[in-house]
Image (spheres, grey):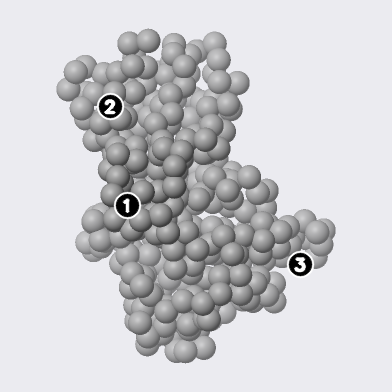
């Protein structure tokens, strides 16, 4: 297997998708000859031509509106929103058009061949317009699938699965890990099942749950906990909508405790949905209240970014508090 960083793995997935499907088209702001602001689409225009990899105007609503039309007429549409913070002008197109296309026609037509890629999250000193984690806004929308990878291997397999899925997918990419996360990735084609969480590490005392870039911090906290004799079970949710309730519930019934961590602010964050569901499924097995370690309820700060983030130290302290409850 080749050594790839997260960007290279994503690029490889799109390359394979375009090579195997002549209708696959990649488009967005600066994705053409420039290769995207992070270079995720590097050399795709050179390889597949300007008709299949091209720049759009700076209009996110227009990008997704065009993507809906393209997917509706049978093409495989792979749209890039340059930063997740800029996905909000396209919110209406995604939640009122993409998500409802199949339903409103009784399956006569759909936009199931639509994938929207967008980099999310902080840790890059990007300030409040380049650091947000807006995944929870979209998990409230039946008809979409929401996917977040944590490393290069997962990114390639999940992105290929998303592109080939029969439903519109919003694929959030943890930009803090674009070049920082490196690992072995098959050069050929493979997919990872959507809506299936991964048991990353077995443990007995507490279940730690997260997704995307937060998994690295969860792993660090779990190692600190192990040093003081606390055994952590770690689960990467991977797909947030629809999410794998069974895998999480099975783990929590075993450990008796659950800690959920994400970058986004705590109020209205997806951790709240998980907590509500798991207390319903596992109430008689719980040894302590379900814990949430998340971002603060403030606009994402620049100077105080590290204080805002739900880092490994905050997670570690929450692990101890849960086990000692």
Residue corresponding to mark 1: 302
- The front one of 122 and 303 is 303
Label 2 packing within 10 angstroms: few (<14), some (14-19), many (20+):
many
Q: CA distance from mark 3 to mark 1?
A: 44 Å
Residue 163 spot, x, y in % from top left: 52, 64
| Element carrying mark 3 | loop
Q: How far apart, in angstroms, are the residues tagged by discs 2 and 1?
A: 24 Å
Task: Pick whichever, 298 or 313, lies toward us.
Answer: 298
What residue sits 55% from the left and 37% below the top?
A: 268
Rendered view: 202 above or below 216: above
The N terminus, quarter of image: bottom left
Look at the numbered discs 3 and 1 and tell me whether their residues touch, using CB distance below 8 Å: no
Find out whether the residues at labels 2 and 1 contact each other: C-beta distance under 8 Å.
no
Q: Position of residue 142 (x, y in %)?
A: 68, 48
Residue that label 3 marks: 109
* Nearest to N terminus: mark 2 or mark 1: 1
The quadrant of the picture occupied by the C terminus is top left
Q: Which residue is mark 2?
A: 316
Q: Point out which mark residue 23 bears.
A: none
Whichever of labels 3 and 2 marks the residue nearer the N terminus, that label is: 3
């Amino acid at each position: 297997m080749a050594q790839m960083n997260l960007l290279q793995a994503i690029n490889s997935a799109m390359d394979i998708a375009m090579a195997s499907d002549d209708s696959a088209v990649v488009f967005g702001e600066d994705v053409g000859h420039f290769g995207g602001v992070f270079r995720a689409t590097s050399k795709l225009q050179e390889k597949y031509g300007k008709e299949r990899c091209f720049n759009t105007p700076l209009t996110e609503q227009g990008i997704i509106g065009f993507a809906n039309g393209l997917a509706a007429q049978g093409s495989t549409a792979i749209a890039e929103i340059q930063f997740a913070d800029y996905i909000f002008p396209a919110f209406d197109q995604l939640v009122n058009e993409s998500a409802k296309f199949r339903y409103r026609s009784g399956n006569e037509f759909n936009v199931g061949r639509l994938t929207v890629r967008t980099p999310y999250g902080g840790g890059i000193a990007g300030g409040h317009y380049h650091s947000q984690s807006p995944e929870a806004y979209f998990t409230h929308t039946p008809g979409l699938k929401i996917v977040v990878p944590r490393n290069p291997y997962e990114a390639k397999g999940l992105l290929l699965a998303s592109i080939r899925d029969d439903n519109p997918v919003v694929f959030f990419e943890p930009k803090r890990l674009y070049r920082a996360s490196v690992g072995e990735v098959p050069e050929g084609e493979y997919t990872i099942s959507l809506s299936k969480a991964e048991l990353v590490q077995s443990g007995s005392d507490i279940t730690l749950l997260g997704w995307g870039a937060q998994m690295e911090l969860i792993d660090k906290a779990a190692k600190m906990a192990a040093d003081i004799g606390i055994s952590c079970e770690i689960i990467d949710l991977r797909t947030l909508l629809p999410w794998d309730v069974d895998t999480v519930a099975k783990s929590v019934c075993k450990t008796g405790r659950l800690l959920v961590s994400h970058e986004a602010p705590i109020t209205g964050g997806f951790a709240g949905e998980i907590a509500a569901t798991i207390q319903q499924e596992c109430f008689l097995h719980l040894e302590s209240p379900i814990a949430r370690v998340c971002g603060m309820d403030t606009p994402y700060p620049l100077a105080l970014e590290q204080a805002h983030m739900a880092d490994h130290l905050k997670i570690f302290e929450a692990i101890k508090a849960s086990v000692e409850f």
